[in-house]
Amino acid sequence: MSHWIARLALVSWISITPFSLCNAQTAPAKKASKLAPAQAWTLDASHSQIGFSTTWAGKAIKGSFGQWSGDIRFDPANLAGSSAVITIMTGSAKTGVKEPDDNLPGADWFDTRTFPTAHYTTSSIRALGQNRYNSEGLLTIKGVNYRVAFPFNVKISGSVATMTGQVTLDRIALRLGLESDRNAEWVARPTVVTISVRAIKK
């Protein structure tokens, strides 16, 4: 039985809604074509991380994705032209615990043979005040798109930007682990995903 996702920290729930792949590809493109793109940034991979906090079989574990990349454009004065596309190699997820690590690539979970990557693509970013922002976007896992709001903080000092953010996702809504644990008797439904990014201005 494969088990890996659950809640480690108390974080507010984020609405996740399946979305048509066709609609996801057409609507944002028309809007973006009319906007001047914001400042581009180069991801500093050695100082950036996508991690997840989870409980499994009643025990708290932490994991991270070892391979991912980001196409980032951000300017607080040009949020309409700001955007991010994050690409994650799902097969690089590791927790350091044998059973989840052995089963994460399987068809019931990430199905890495058929879908080796997951993506998060922003459709809009708005300011919340005091260096806080919220992005609306599409999370694509196993070929299915979900609307996900992602709150984050950004600080820019000269040519260096640092970003941190956290969101809680529902694995049942994302159709992960349905065959082995649909009722969340062994693996809880939520997982906390934490992202920290250091980027250099291009």
Image (spheres, helix red, strand yellow):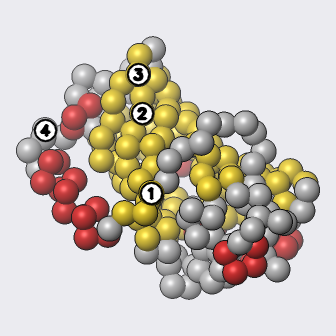
> Label 3, label 4: how many angstroms apart (C-alpha)?
22 Å
> What amino acid is at disc 4?
Ala
Tell me where residue 139 appears, x and y as whole percent.
Answer: 45, 58
Tell me the mark number nearer the camera, choosing from 3 and 4: 3
Q: Which numbered dot is residue 134?
A: 2
Left or right of 168, for residue 183: right
Residue 122, compared with residue 109, is above or below; it is: above
Disc 2, SS:
strand
- Residue at left offset 52%, top offset 39%: 197
Q: Of the numbered discs in the image, which one, if any, rests on residue 77?
A: none
- Circle 4 residues within 10 Å: few <14, some 14–19, many ≥20: few
Q: Rounded to the nearest whole Å, what is the CA distance between mark 4 and mark 2?
A: 20 Å
Quarter of the image with the N terminus is bottom right
- Check disc 4 and report the residue beneath it: 36
* Residue that sits furthest to the top in the current view: 130
What secondary structure is found at the residue carrying circle 1?
Answer: strand
**Quadrant position of residue 22:** bottom left
Query: Which amino acid, by three-letter code, is at mark 1?
Result: Thr
Which residue matches tag 1? 17
User: Which numbered disc flags the more N-terminal residue, 3 or 2?
Assistant: 3
Alpha carbons under labels 1 and 4: distance apart: 29 Å
Query: Residue 199 appears in which quarter of the rendering?
Result: top left
- List the residue tagged with mark 3: 128
Vertical position of residue 64 compared to residue 3: above or below: above
- Residue at 33% x, 30% y is 126
Of circles 1 and 4, which is in front? Answer: 1
Could you tell me which quadrant the C terminus lies in?
top left
Q: Which comes before the other along the chain, label 3 or label 4? A: 4
Give the foreground label among 1 and 2.
1
Q: Is residue 54 visible?
A: yes
